[in-house]
Image (spheres, coloured by chain):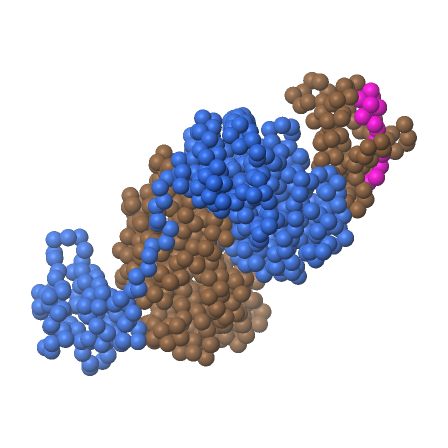
Chain colours: A blue, B brown
Amino acid sequence: MDETSQPIELLLSVSRAGSRTLGTQIEDQLRRAIREGALRPDARVPSTRDLAGQLGVSRRVVVDAYAQLAAEGYLSLRQGARPRVSGATGLASVASPPAMPPAGTATAPRARFDFRPSVPDVSTFPRAAWLRSLRTALATVTDADLGYGDPRGVEALRSALADYLGRVRGVVADPEHIIITNGYTQGLGLVCHALARAGAKRIALEDPSNPDDGLVAARAGLDPVPIGVDEAGTRVDELEQADADAVVLTPAHQHPTGAVLTGERRTALLAWLRDRDAIAIEDDYDAEYRYDRAAVGALQGLDPDRVVYAGSVSKTLAPALRIGWLVVPPALAQAVSHEKLLADRGTARIEQHAFADFLTRGELDRHLRRMRARYRARRDALVQALTEALPETSVRGVAAGLHVTVQLLDSDNEQTIREEAGHRRIELETMSDFRPNAAGRPPALVLGYAQMSEPAIRTGVHELALAVQAARVRA
Amino acid sequence: MDETSQPIELLLSVSRAGSRTLGTQIEDQLRRAIREGALRPDARVPSTRDLAGQLGVSRRVVVDAYAQLAAEGYLSLRQGARPRVSGATGLASVASPPAMPPAGTATAPRARFDFRPSVPDVSTFPRAAWLRSLRTALATVTDADLGYGDPRGVEALRSALADYLGRVRGVVADPEHIIITNGYTQGLGLVCHALARAGAKRIALEDPSNPDDGLVAARAGLDPVPIGVDEAGTRVDELEQADADAVVLTPAHQHPTGAVLTGERRTALLAWLRDRDAIAIEDDYDAEYRYDRAAVGALQGLDPDRVVYAGSVSKTLAPALRIGWLVVPPALAQAVSHEKLLADRGTARIEQHAFADFLTRGELDRHLRRMRARYRARRDALVQALTEALPETSVRGVAAGLHVTVQLLDSDNEQTIREEAGHRRIELETMSDFRPNAAGRPPALVLGYAQMSEPAIRTGVHELALAVQAARVRA
């Protein structure tokens, strides 16, 4: 026996006490020794006869363990030669995996006041009602529905959504042209892929808007082009010059400015879509919340052949559900369905059945009625507190959604205010978070109010005013 | 009053009996009339005063309804002018949406014998155990976990999977480098996007393999290149000439041939990965099922820095759950996590908590033990029936997974056999379904046995033999 096999005796031991077979114990210990570098590449290991004798096990056990390790590439077994650890080319790196700081585990101290927009009050998520719908779904789902199924989603949900969206948002929705997604972001990606494959090159995005939309469009091969937003909503007149084949917009409540696309702009947009033979993607992200009047109906209802309607439960129930939907022009339905197939073969189906049950039982309507009253009171508290504590600023946008935009003084600096707010553990976003190029634009804050109680909102705004003052002193 | 507003009187009526407001009734009826073309673009509608008088409602109600419709783009209201339906440019198409045959609704007669591979026996899906895990998840999930959360997925699940994959498949898995996906297809797309952004150009795919893999890779901007497969698994020697930056392979049980990548090939693959500085994507789709011996450990364990490990519950529990995972080399983890964010902001989180509970309670192990015995008996029944009914064919591949490959005579024609099988309502796939270019390749059938009882398998093979004979007579 030569010296290179010596460490084996020190490393290996087997026990007949546990539930694991002797062979498995040998395999596991050898695997670990090779991985951790205790056994180097090309090192000889004992013959099966020697090792069996050392460990007091039958030779068959060792032969099988070695064969397993050879099949996995750890050992090299050649007729007539002593067994060895596999060659250096394959294994050198295994011994020392590079260290890397774990991503996303930095634990920032929890915010005292969380004014970040875009997340609803999930503390009111109707857990009991949702469980009831899950139980119904599991009790009634067919075996066929536990397979891959139609990539567009479960028929019962597409039907229930067609009814709901027609009733609540004036969407013209045939269940055949509805595609269930894992939320808005995926839906945007699917449509962009379908458009790119149909020859589209450029897609207009509102400036300001969600910054990830541009990255999603670019992943699909489209070139994002910003177009402006003013008090009347998207600057439809800029579309011509943008030379775009499609446009993404938030007509009911522009994100994040809070403007509503006017009737004139809607008509102009439809004319552009027709002249250009273009497609609009309507991100109807929070239209369920309008506090001063009925929400403006969906743009999609005006031209279902040119407008893709996109919605989700992320602002109404909880982002964690990852359920969204697209209502797609008939001519695009097959292409978008195929993109969904290639994206992930369809959204989880038991939850789709649960959501269909939840919708048809009126649970979503009930939840929304409760939440509308709650959010309206929170918005009122926020606006009033801002008027009192920061009278030199102004709240922009209509009374809707889950956030407000606060226009600052032109001399204010968003970054300094954000830093001062951070020192006070106030979390917020600013307008430049939503702009591809924020230089020279009037400064503004984007404050969500969905997750905070009214007293917390009042105290939070008071502290925010101190942060704004401190920032001005620093400037 | 002019003639163009005449039809309005015929169209509109309001009722005080129902729960809907007078204004809503007016809005809905006008919207429908405009959409359906009963009111053409530019058509005048009655003044608010006239309509209020005709319907016997207060003028305020009609003013508000018109304002709503104008805001939605249906009506055009101008100071001093009579209200009109919005202009032709925007609305002409609404009147006549193009007819399109509904996609995917053709109802083929149900197969008598379903030999399609790739779907497990979902009739045994442990509904009660899964509901228990869902209930636990809903009772314990924190409010923070109902938000968007870490795009990589729920920490509890990533930890549980790291343990499970290490124990069962020899995967070296740090929860930090695990990304929960909506199944294998999405995982492949995420990795391809990350590789493409890091400069990769070409990706080698096994020939034969799942045909969608090439489309997924192409969507991410990679050029798919086929490499051969023989009895020893993937033809690693062809990688050099393929000039690829990455390779997708099924080492434990090649899909669909059933070959196992040998130890020598594994060593050669690792050498190539190192020399080329390339990445392998290990699709470990059905390695939980090996009937004649312990499954070969995952390739990933040999070089976690160069092998992406991909798995899912689609073959063990049910495709409908849409839960999968990637174990990613540390250097790629951040990029793949970002791709997941842009793909859909993360997989549904309540189900991730449920699956973590299911795993840690040992439910998956229990289910797999039950299913292994069942599938093994079905495979045995299939192989025996084939030996008896089609003795001139031969079953290829190791005793594993949920399907077998049946080598036909060189003179057999896959397409004719498929047609004859279809006449007998036997569903199956053939080798050409898995090849980018099947011309001149030896014909074979790919038969799944997971979804059929043993008697059904025997009868099905008997009928299949008749189909094969009929096809030979036709030739």
Percent of width and height locating residue A177: 63, 46
Residue B132 in the magenta stretch? The answer is no
Tell me if I can see residue A70 in this picture. no
Tell me if I can see residue B190 in this picture. yes
Percent of width and height locating residue A32: 22, 63
Give the magenta part as a residue range: B41-55
On screen, residue A266 versus residue B312, left or right, reads right
Q: Is residue A283 above or below residue A276?
A: above
Q: In this view, does B45 lie above or below A328?
A: above
Question: In the rendered picture of this protein, how many numbered marks are placed on residues?
Answer: 0
On screen, residue A235 versus residue A403, left or right, reads right
User: Residue B218 versus residue A216: which sits nearer the camera?
Assistant: A216
Percent of width and height locating residue A7: 13, 69
Please report the residue visible at 71 percent of the width from the left and 25 percent of the height from the top: B23
Please report the residue visible at 58 percent of the width from the left and 69 percent of the height from the top: B474
User: Residue B138 versus residue A101: which sits nearer the camera?
Assistant: A101
Please state, as top left, top right, bottom left or bottom right, where the N terminus of chain A lies in the image: bottom left
Residue B53 in the magenta stretch? The answer is yes
Percent of width and height locating residue A394: 59, 34
User: Residue A208 versus residue B419: which sits nearer the camera?
Assistant: A208
**Quarter occupied by residue A380:** top right
Please report the residue visible at 56 percent of the width from the left and 67 percent of the height from the top: B415
On screen, residue B5 versus residue A464, left or right, reads right
Q: Looking at the image, which residue sits at the far bottom?
A: A80
Q: Is residue A475 above or below residue A223?
A: above
Please report the residue visible at 31 percent of the width from the left and 53 percent of the height from the top: B162
On screen, residue B128 versus residue A356, left or right, reads left
